[in-house]
Image: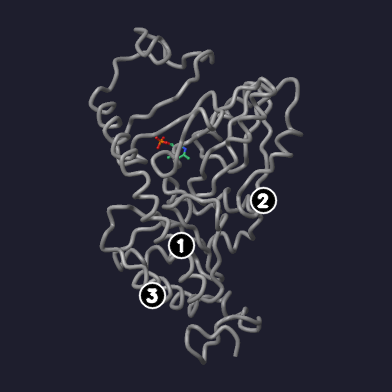
Amino acid sequence: HIITTNIEHPAVKNTLGFLESLDFKVTYLPVNEEGIISVDDLKEAITDETILITIMHANNELGTIQPIEEIGKIAREKGIKFHTDAVQSFGKIEVDVEKLNVDLLSLSSHKINGPKGVGALYIKKGTRVVPLIHGGGQERGIRSGTENVPGIVGFGKACQLAAENLDAHYEKLSSIRDELIEKVLTTIPEAYLNGSEEIRLPNLVNFRFKAIEGESLILLLDAKGYQASTGSACSSNTLEASPVLTALGLDPVDVHGSLRISLAPESDAFDVDEFVNVIAEAVKRLRQMSPLWNQELDYDNIMCRKHEDNCRKC
Ligand SMILES: *Cc1c(COP(=O)(O)O)cnc(C)c1O
């Protein structure tokens, strides 16, 4: 029996699906409207057969952070191994395997500007791991095959740079993030933040706009030189509603009106006001064509066509 959440990245989700086909039992914990699991739900889900808890540190679509430290404590008390997917949080916020009480933690190089095709698994001493790849016994027999040395060196350098700049980048990005959230929510009618306002990564924001289609919005933003995405960056060509946003309890129509924005510390020329204006213009244009928005005109609290953009009630 394995316990996880219903918002894991496919890297974990599909692996567990495979294990289910081998008769492992998997419990998928729900998340609240902010995308955070309940520790009580976790405690209740634990049985005598539970061998592993795997819960992501920060979500890749929302940026929401799970209470890993607390989960780790519970797992340790019960003698259950605990893995966290820290691919999104690593290099963005502090990731300390001791503090987080984890036995296993996974990382990916390209998410911190390192080369693609390299990753790392932290294994706490005393945690037995069965290899998936057998061969010449490299990496202490856990992952055979000659090592990708240039990739590993590049990942190492990326880790070093991420560690050196962690605090400065956190400061810089979280203040841009907060300004962006504030301006989008106050200047665009019927705009909402997906995920937690407080417990989130500095570099990731996810909004939704009523009565528009997110895919059309990213095309309009792209034409203005901004690259954003609707859900997960790896599955931008599917039109299926994001399972992560659906897990928040959102209506499928609202899920399709979502916009995920990643902020990079390198983007020095980034001007929040200019960007919010571009989004506001694009949202307005799409709403003018949206049959959903027409129907919504009767609602209180939304933009009136006769007035300016900022008219909330007329
Ligand atoms: C990108 C990502 C992965 C997968 O890492 P790859 O190295 O791209 O396969 C796993 N989990 C999360 C949270 C991610 O964002």
Q: Is residue 275 above or below residue 97?
A: below
Which mark sits nearer the N-terminus, 2 or 3? 2
Ligand 1 positioned in quadrant? top left
Disc 2 CB within 8 Å of nearest ligand 1 atom: no
Between disc 1 and disc 2, whose residue precedes?
2
Q: Tell me which corner region of the image, top left, top right, bottom left or bottom right, holds residue 296.
A: bottom right
Quarter location, residue 110: top left
Q: Amino acid at mark 2?
A: Asn
What amino acid does circle 3 point to?
Answer: Asn
The image position of residue 294, as x and y in percent, is 58, 81
| Residue at the image point whose x is 67% and y is 39% from the top | 29
Quadrant that contains the N terminus: top right
Residue 301 is marked as none
Q: Is residue 135 above or below residue 101?
A: above
Give the Cα separation between the discs numbered 1 and 3. Answer: 16 Å
The residue positioned 53% from the left and 32% from the top of the image is 99
Between 96 and 109, the residue placed more toward the observer is 96
Q: Which mark is residue 178?
A: 1
Quadrant in the picture for residue 111? top left
Q: Residues within 10 Å of mark 3 (few under 14, many from 20)?
A: some
Assign a secondary structure to mark 3.
helix
The residue singled out by tag 3 in the image is 277
In this view of the protein, which residue sits in the foreground, 78 or 259? 78
Question: From what the image shows, is residue 205 above or below residue 233?
Answer: below
Q: Which residue is mark 2?
A: 32
In space, the residues marked 2 and 3 are separated at their CA atoms by: 31 Å
Marks 1 and 3 in Cβ contact (< 8 Å): no
Q: Is residue 245 left or right of residue 175?
A: right
